[in-house]
Amino acid sequence: MRDLDVVLEPRHELLRTELRGWLARNAPPRPADDDNDSDEQTMLAHRREWHARLSAGGWSAVGWPERFGGRAADALDRYLYHEELTRAGVPRLLTTAGIALVGPVLMRHGTPEQQARHLPRILSGEELWCLGLTEPDAGSDLAGLRAEARLEDGGWVLSGRKTWVRWAEPATHCAVLVRTEQAPRHRGLSFLAVALNDPAVTVRPLRSADGRHTWDTVDFDAVRVPADALIGERGGGWAVAMGLMELERADQSFADHTDLLELLRTALAAAGARHRRGEIDDAALSRLHRGAVAVWTRCQLFRAVNLRTARRLRAGEPVGDEGSLIRLHWTRAYQELAAVVEDACGPGLLAADAWSRRYLDARATSIFSGSSEIQRTVVGERIARLPRTRTRTRTTPKG
């Protein structure tokens, strides 16, 4: 199934041509879905090697300003960049949080000293960053966090627990959102840059239902953090966190539609092979083809949404609340794809490594970066301007 043609301005197409040529010479012969390696250390080493190759070629952070080692690529360039990397089937960067999120935050909110200390190491892959946002008792309520840091003897003392931290185990640093002031909810929050090699930091793996290890729980037991590790203003952490969410829901989504389209093609090829072996019948293959058309159409619409987002970002317009629409588009398309494959092919195809992980991963997308219910609330209240829902307090009659 061929994608709809998208032709941009000549200078953007030149970047596409340059990147395709570089990938043809440098891309490793490895499928993109290398999250499914049974040997996690092999996968980590493979990703580190790929990051080093990208960095040496000047392709690890194309959107960063040139003074920080990037190519000053605008949003349309980044849109093409993510599409081409995904189509080439190269490994995902282990340093995505550092390149796409922490780096831009340090450029916007960090001190010159922080920028000089961390940005070159993030670019090269020497520093691997993760994000400490979610907590066990807060769930999607980011403002309900309990981790706190207090100033003591010229530095911060950090205590608390963060969970569902992606790739904390191999990370060297964590950007942690904590409460530094006694203030209501969104106020009094701050971001700290914390080195994870401190003996007072404990990282414990969270195994998913298929036994994979991608997420961790991180405990901070009175960890001493230098005073200059504060990212942005003291008490201004909520604004920094919202900036992170906007980055995650916009720029990072540029590869999502391509990723789903490549996965759809893989499913069709695998199902065709099973049909030729007599493992699924004509009716099942026909159901898959009908479902694939619907998923392909949704992915093309998602592609158009991402392209529109890139054009808006290039024009200097913030994505803002529309990031929730992007997240909902992705979640629905991913889950529909998983449902189509399951319905047509049954557990036989899902039992394969890539598909077992992808199917389970699709179910979990409803809570990524804020649950789908929260995203719909944002869309309803802030974009559609629907009235806020009032929660009634139910009382039990006496007697």
Image (cartoon, rainbow, N blue to C red):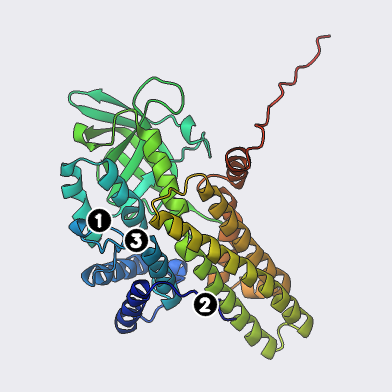
The amino acid pointed to by label 3 is Asp
Q: Is residue 367 left or right of residue 234?
A: right
Q: Is residue 62 left or right of residue 138?
A: left
Q: Is residue 202 above or below residue 2?
A: above
Q: Earlier in the sequence, mark 2 or mark 1?
A: 2
Q: Residue at x 46, y 40 (%)?
A: 134
The amino acid pointed to by label 1 is Ile
Residue at the far bottom in the pictured view: 276
Residue 207: x and y in percent read 49, 54
Residue 88: x and y in percent read 41, 77
Q: Residue at x 45, y 43 (%)?
A: 163
The picture quadrant where one finds residue 47 is bottom left
**Spatial distance from mark 3 to mark 1, Cα to Cα?**
20 Å
The picture quadrant where one finds residue 30 is bottom left
Badge 3 crowding class, 10 Å Cα cut-off, few under 14, some 14 to 19, many 20 or more, is some
Residue 7: x and y in percent read 46, 75
Q: What residue is disc 2 on?
A: 5
The amino acid pointed to by label 2 is Asp
**Spatial distance from mark 2 to mark 1, Cα to Cα?**
35 Å
Where disc 2 sits, the SS reads loop
Mark 3 vs mark 1: give the one in front.
3
